[in-house]
Image (cartoon, rainbow, N blue to C red):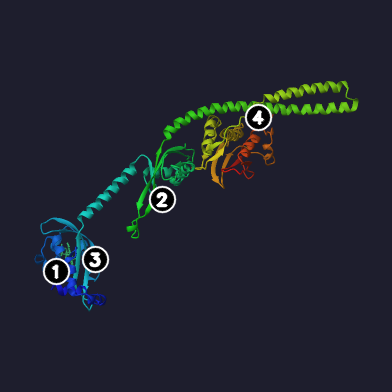
C-alpha cells in the first residue's frame, strides 16, 4: 500500500520524467530514511503510511498508526479555527502549513510545524494527503527567549533616564527610547540625533585615534549644547557613541559574511550641572563686561573729545596761516595763536595717549547661540525693568564660528541695548524683542528686532557713521555703538544692516560667515 501511494506522490509529468531515471525503490528508501516525520493519509485524514522519523517523533510505531486518524496526535488545545482553515485549504487542493500542539503516545506535548500537501490523481482529484512535520519545541523556546530578551532590552532602554538612539550611516534613527521622543517634542519635533551628531563630529574632525582620523563611531562624554525655541533655557548633553555591528541576514552573505555598522548614541542630560556652572560663568562675564563697558565708555568719551577738539585746532591753524600770509611770519597775533595751537596740539597728543588701547583677544571657536544667550542673560534686569518681552528663537544647532568672543558679545550687547533704549521711551507701549538665529548660505544669520519707533529711512545708513546719533543732546551716548558694531562684523568677514523693509520697529540683521574668505 505504502509503495503504491509513494508512486502517486511522484506522479505528474515532471515527476514521471524525474522518476524514470531512478528506481521506484529509491523513493521508498528516501521517504523511509528522511529525517522528518512523514505520513500519508486518505482524504479523511486516516493514516495509510508513516516513516520511521514519524514514529521517533510521535512514539507511535507504523502498525499502531496505520488506520488511525491524524487527530490521534491532537492535544485538543489547538484552536478549532486552525483545523478548519487547514481542512479548507487542503480540501481545495492547496498546500497548508502551520504550527499546532501535538501529543505523543506517552502523553507528552510538543509543538509541531506541519505542512500538508494534497496528492491528486491523473484526473486532478485529491486522493491522498502528504503530511510532514517536525518537533520545533526547542526552536520555539529559543525564539521566545530571543523575543523576551528583546522585549526586556526594549523596556529597559525605553525606561532608561537618558536619550538612546541607534543610527544608520546616514544618521537615520532606527530605534529610539522615550527620553529621545521627549527631547524630539521639546525641539518642535525636529530629529535630535542628527543635531547631536553634527556637533559631535565637528569636534571629532580634528581628532585622531592611534594616528588615524576618528571614524565617528567611538566617542565618550562629548558635551553638546542644544538651544531650544520659545525662550526655553538651553540643554546640555554628555554624549557617548559606540559601534554596533549587524550581520547581514541575506542568503548571499551566508558563507561570505558581511554586515552593516550602526551607531549606538547615548546622551545623558547634564543641564542641571551645567546650569550651575553657567550661573557662575555669567556672573564672571558680567564683571568683565562691566569693566569693558567702563573702558570703552572712557575710550568713546576721549575719542569724541579729541574729535571735537580737532575742529577748533584746525580752525586756529587756518587763522594762523591767514595772518602769516597777510601780515608776515612775525605777526604778534599769529605768533601767539601758533603758540596756543602748539600747546593745544600737545594737549591733544597727551589726550590721545590716554585713550586706553584696544586689547586684541585671541580668536576661538564660538557658539553664537551661547553668546547671544549670555547677552540676554546679562540684559535680563534691564529687560524686566523696561517690561520688554523677549522672543528668543535660536536654531537648535548652529555651526561653530571662528572669531573674537568678547568683541561679538559686546556687539550684540550694543544692539540689544539700543533696542531696549528705543522701546523704553516714555509712553511707548509696544515692547517686544525678538532674537533669531539660523544657519544659512555658509553663514549664521542673526536678527535682532524690536517694536520701538524704528529708524527713519533717511537715517538708516547714517547711523553707522562714527559719532552720529539719533538721540537728543544731553544723552550719554556718543553715537559710536553702531559704527563699532559694524567694525566688529567686518572684522569677522560679516555684514550688519538695518532692514529697510521693516515697518514698525527696527530689524538689525547681522550675517557672519562660518568660514572666512582669506
Ligand atoms: P475533528 O473532529 O477531527 O475536526 C475538527 C475540524 O476539522 C472540523 O470542524 C472540520 O472543520 C475539520 N475537518 C476534520 N476532518 C475533516 C475532513 N475530512 N474534511 C474537511 N474538514 C475536516 N492534526 C493534529 O492535531 N496534528 C497533526 O499532526 C495532524 N497532522 C495531519 C496530517 C494530515 C496529512 C492531515 C490530512 C491532517 C492532519 N491533522 C493533524 C488534522 C487532523 O486530521 C484533525 O483534523 C485534527 O487533529 C483535529 O482533530 P479533532 O479530533 O480535534 O477534530
What's the residue at 18%, 74% (across, down)? 24
- Is ligand 1 within 8 Å of the beta carbon of the residue shown at mark 2? no
Mark 2, residues whose alpha carbon is within 10 Å: few (<14), some, or many (≥20)?
some
State whether residue 490 is above or below residue 174.
above
| Labels 4 and 1: the sequence-earlier one | 1
* Residue 96 image label: 3
Q: Could you classify mark 3 by the number of other residues whose Cα lies within 10 Å: few (under 14), some (14-19), or many (20 or more)?
A: some
The image quadrant where one finds the C terminus is: top right
* Mark 3 CB near ligand 1 (8 Å cut): no
Asked whether the residues under the numbered discs 4 and 3 touch, taking CB atoms below 8 Å apart as contact, a structural biologist would say no
Between the residue at mark 4 and the residue at mark 1, the CA separation in whole angstroms equals 107 Å
Residue corresponding to mark 4: 477
* Label placed on residue 429: none
Q: x%, y% of residue 496?
A: 62, 40
Q: CA distance from mark 4 to mark 3?
A: 90 Å
Residue at image mark 1: 49
Earlier in the chain: of badge 2 and badge 3, it is 3
First-in-chain label (3 vs 1)? 1
Asked if residue 515 lies left or right of residue 259, the reply is: right
Q: Residues within 10 Å of mark 4 (few under 14, many from 20)?
A: some
Amino acid at each position: 500500500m505504502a509503495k503504491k501511494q509513494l508512486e502517486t506522490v511522484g506522479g505528474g509529468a515532471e515527476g514521471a520524467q524525474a522518476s524514470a531515471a531512478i528506481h521506484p525503490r529509491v523513493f521508498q528508501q528516501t521517504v523511509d530514511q528522511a529525517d522528518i516525520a512523514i505520513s500519508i493519509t486518505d482524504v479523511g485524514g486516516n493514516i495509510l503510511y508513516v516513516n520511521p522519523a514519524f514514529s521517533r517523533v510521535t512514539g507511535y510505531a507504523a502498525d499502531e498508526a496505520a488506520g488511525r486518524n491524524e487527530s490521534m496526535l491532537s492535544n485538543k488545545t489547538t484552536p478549532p479555527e486552525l483545523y478548519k482553515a487547514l481542512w479548507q485549504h487542503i480540501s481545495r487542493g492547496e498546500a497548508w502549513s502551520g504550527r499546532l500542539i501535538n501529543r505523543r503516545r506517552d502523553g507528552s506535548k510538543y509543538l509541531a510545524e506541519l505542512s500538508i500537501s494534497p496528492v491528486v490523481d491523473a484526473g486532478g482529484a485529491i486522493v491522498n494527503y502528504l503530511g510532514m512535520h517536525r518537533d520545533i519545541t526547542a526552536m520555539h523556546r529559543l525564539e521566545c527567549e530571543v523575543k523576551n530578551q528583546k522585549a526586556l532590552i526594549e523596556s529597559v532602554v525605553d525606561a532608561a533616564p537618558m536619550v538612546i538612539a541607534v543610527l544608520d550611516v546616514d544618521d537615520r534613527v532606527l530605534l529610539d527610547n522615550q527620553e529621545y521622543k521627549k527631547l524630539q517634542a521639546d525641539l518642535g519635533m525636529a530629529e535630535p540625533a542628527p543635531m547631536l551628531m553634527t556637533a559631535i563630529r565637528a569636534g571629532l574632525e580634528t581628532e585622531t585615534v592611534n594616528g588615524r582620523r576618528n571614524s565617528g563611531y567611538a566617542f565618550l562624554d562629548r558635551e553638546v549644547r542644544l538651544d531650544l525655541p520659545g525662550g526655553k533655557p538651553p540643554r546640555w548633553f554628555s554624549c557617548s557613541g559606540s559601534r554596533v555591528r549587524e550581520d547581514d541576514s541575506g542568503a548571499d552573505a551566508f558563507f561570505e559574511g558581511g554586515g552593516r555598522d550602526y551607531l549606538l548614541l547615548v546622551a545623558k542630560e547634564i543641564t542641571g550641572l551645567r546650569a550651575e556652572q553657567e550661573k557662575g560663568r555669567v556672573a564672571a562675564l558680567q564683571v568683565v563686561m562691566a569693566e569693558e563697558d567702563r573702558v570703552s565708555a572712557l575710550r568713546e568719551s576721549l575719542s569724541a573729545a579729541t574729535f571735537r577738539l580737532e575742529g577748533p585746532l584746525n580752525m586756529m591753524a587756518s587763522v594762523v596761516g591767514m595772518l602769516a600770509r597777510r601780515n608776515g611770519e612775525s605777526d604778534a597775533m599769529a605768533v601767539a595763536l601758533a603758540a596756543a595751537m602748539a600747546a593745544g596740539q600737545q594737549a591733544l597728543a597727551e589726550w590721545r595717549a590716554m585713550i586706553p588701547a584696544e586689547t586684541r583677544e585671541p580668536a576661538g571657536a564660538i557658539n553664537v547661540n551661547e553668546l547671544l544667550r549670555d547677552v540676554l542673560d546679562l540684559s535680563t534686569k534691564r529687560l524686566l525693568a523696561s517690561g520688554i518681552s523677549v522672543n528668543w528663537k535660536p536654531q537648535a544647532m548652529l555651526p561653530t564660528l571662528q572669531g573674537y568672543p568678547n568683541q561679538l558679545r559686546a556687539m550684540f550687547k550694543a544692539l540689544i541695548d539700543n533696542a531696549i533704549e528705543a522701546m523704553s521711551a516714555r509712553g511707548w507701549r509696544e515692547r517686544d524683542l525678538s532674537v533669531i538665529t539660523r544657519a544659512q548660505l555658509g553663514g549664521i544669520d542673526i536678527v535682532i528686532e524690536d517694536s520701538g519707533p524704528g529708524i527713519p529711512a533717511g537715517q538708516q545708513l547714517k547711523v553707522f557713521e562714527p559719532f552720529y546719533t539719533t538721540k537728543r543732546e544731553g544723552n550719554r551716548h556718543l553715537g559710536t555703538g553702531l559704527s563699532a558694531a559694524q567694525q566688529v562684523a567686518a572684522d569677522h568677514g560679516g555684514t550688519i544692516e538695518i532692514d529697510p523693509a521693516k515697518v514698525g520697529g527696527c530689524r538689525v540683521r547681522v550675517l557672519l560667515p562660518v568660514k572666512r574668505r582669506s
